[in-house]
Each structure stands twice: as C-alpha cells, then as structure tokens.
Image: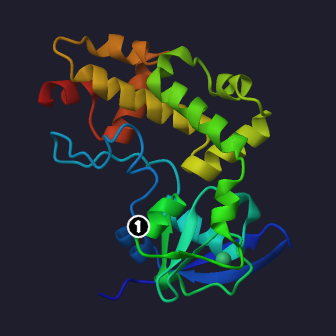
C-alpha cells in the first residue's frame, strides 16, 4: 500500500518559525486508533444499526495528525498528553524530546508508558518519559476527574463555560488541557458527552426521544437533532427504532 502523502504546515510555537513536514495522513488514520475512537465508555467504533460507524471526530481535525504535527514541532505543551514510540529504535519519547525526529511512518502514538512497554518499547534516555510520568501531574488528574464528571452527567453542565468554572484553571488553560488530552474544545467535548449519553438513553425501552435530548443537556430540539445527526449519522428517533 502506498498511502498518499499530504503536506501539512506546522507552526513551531516556541520559535515562531514555520516549517513544512510530510505527514502521511492515510498512514496515520489507518495505523493508529484515534483518541476519539477509543474514548467514552468503550462505546467507540461501535457499528450503529444503520451500518455506519459512530463518528466522534466529526468537527475536529484527526487527533493523530494533530499529534504528529505537535510531535514533529517539539511542542512542549504536548508532554504528558501522549507518547511517541519509534519503531525503528524501539524507544518511546515525550512529544518534545530534543532527539532528532524520526520519519513519521516509524512512529506510533500511545497514551501511557505502560502501553508503550506493552508494545516492547523502552523509555528514551534523553527525555526520560518515565520520570516525567512518575512526577506529580495534578493537572492531568484533575482534568480526568472533570472529564469523567462531564461524561457521567452531561445534563448537569448547561454551558461549556461551566466546565472551566468548575476547574481550577482559567478558560484558556482549561481549553488548552482539553485540546491536549482529548483533541477537543470543552464545548465539543460537552456536545460529544451529550450525544453519547443520549445514545445510552435511546437504547432504553420506551424512551421518549425529545426527553432524552433535554435530559442530556441540549436546550433545544433543533440543537439535539443537529448534533446527534452530525455525530451519529442519523436522527435520534431513527437510532432508537433501529436500536
Ligand atoms: Zn526522547
């Protein structure tokens, strides 16, 4: 297979310089499970009754392409969000590792050092990812707890701004953390959580469609139908009928 190559312009934040990297999007998409695909209560990649795959990443760029861009740019803010395994050397690195960047085709992205080790990779001696992860990362823990709270009961969060308000951070940092860890803005994360919760409700027997939408926090029928269709690929009523 010869995946087509696409050119992506990546802006190096630290230096304010732009450079061009070759990113094989086809490879990235086919070889790596995306953050979005494996998120949310293991319901991902589920084949819907319509035969369509649930698409979480509808309104966001492909998270793996984004990871690749951040890795190649040596983005320090990506440290802790994911790890890059280099298949040719058998090591795994923090995204901002100062070592020379490998060819994109030789990189796999994983979420934790344990996952990297399970793939037979060793920790890089330059960026020392294990030490980084062994350190305290209160932000990461708080973010996970916050994200879980949103997923558990999205109806309790009227607006995306409530997420930042409930966090120990300001709006900007909160949004940056969500983007780094989930590849989504808090608003998109909340919408995703609402749609997910709605699909759970709609699988219950005799669940009224509109009530499901309001229960998960949509404030209008039109917003519910639009977001649901965008993410799932069919109307909520259709989903319930087929479920
Ligand atoms: Zn390294």
- As drawn, is 141 to the left or to the right of 13? left
Above or below, 26 against 61 in this view is below
Query: Residue at point 72% right, 38% down?
Result: 174
- Say which residue appears at 46% left-offset and 68% top-offset: 117
Q: Secondary structure at mark 1?
A: helix
* Quarter of the rendering containing residue 203: top left
Residue 32 percent coordinates (x, y)? 40, 67
Front one among 193 and 122: 122
Q: Nearer the viewer, residue 234 or 24?
A: 24
Where is residue 202? Give x, y as percent.
25, 22
Frontmost residue, 57 versus 136: 136
Ligand 1 quarter of the rendering? bottom right
Q: Is residue 79 visible?
A: no
**Where does label 1 land, which residue?**
118
Residue 16 appears in the figure: yes
Left or right position of 206 against 216? left
Residue 158 lies left or right of residue 132; in this view the side is left
């Amino acid at each position: 297979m010869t995946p087509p190559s696409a050119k992506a312009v990546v802006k190096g934040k630290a230096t304010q310089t732009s450079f061009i990297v070759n990113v094989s999007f086809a490879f990235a998409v086919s070889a790596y499970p995306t953050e979005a695909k494996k998120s949310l209560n293991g319901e991902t990649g589920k084949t819907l009754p319509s035969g369509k795959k649930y698409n979480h990443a509808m309104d966001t760029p492909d998270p793996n392409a984004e990871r690749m861009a951040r890795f190649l740019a040596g983005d320090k803010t990506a440290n802790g969000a994911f790890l890059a395994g280099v298949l040719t050397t058998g090591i795994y690195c923090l995204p901002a590792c100062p070592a020379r960047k490998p060819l994109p085709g030789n990189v796999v992205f994983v979420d934790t050092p344990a996952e990297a080790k399970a793939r037979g990779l060793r920790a890089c001696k330059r960026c020392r990812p294990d030490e980084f992860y062994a350190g305290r990362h209160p932000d990461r823990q708080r973010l996970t707890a916050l994200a879980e709270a949103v997923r558990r009961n999205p109806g309790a969060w009227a607006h995306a701004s409530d997420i930042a308000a409930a966090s120990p951070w300001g709006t900007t940092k909160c949004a940056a953390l969500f983007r780094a860890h989930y590849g989504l803005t808090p608003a998109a994360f909340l919408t995703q959580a609402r749609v997910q919760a709605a699909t759970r409700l709609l699988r219950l027997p005799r669940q009224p469609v509109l009530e499901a939408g309001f229960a998960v926090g949509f404030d209008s029928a039109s917003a519910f139908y639009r977001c649901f269709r965008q993410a799932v690929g069919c109307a909520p009523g259709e989903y319930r009928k087929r479920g």
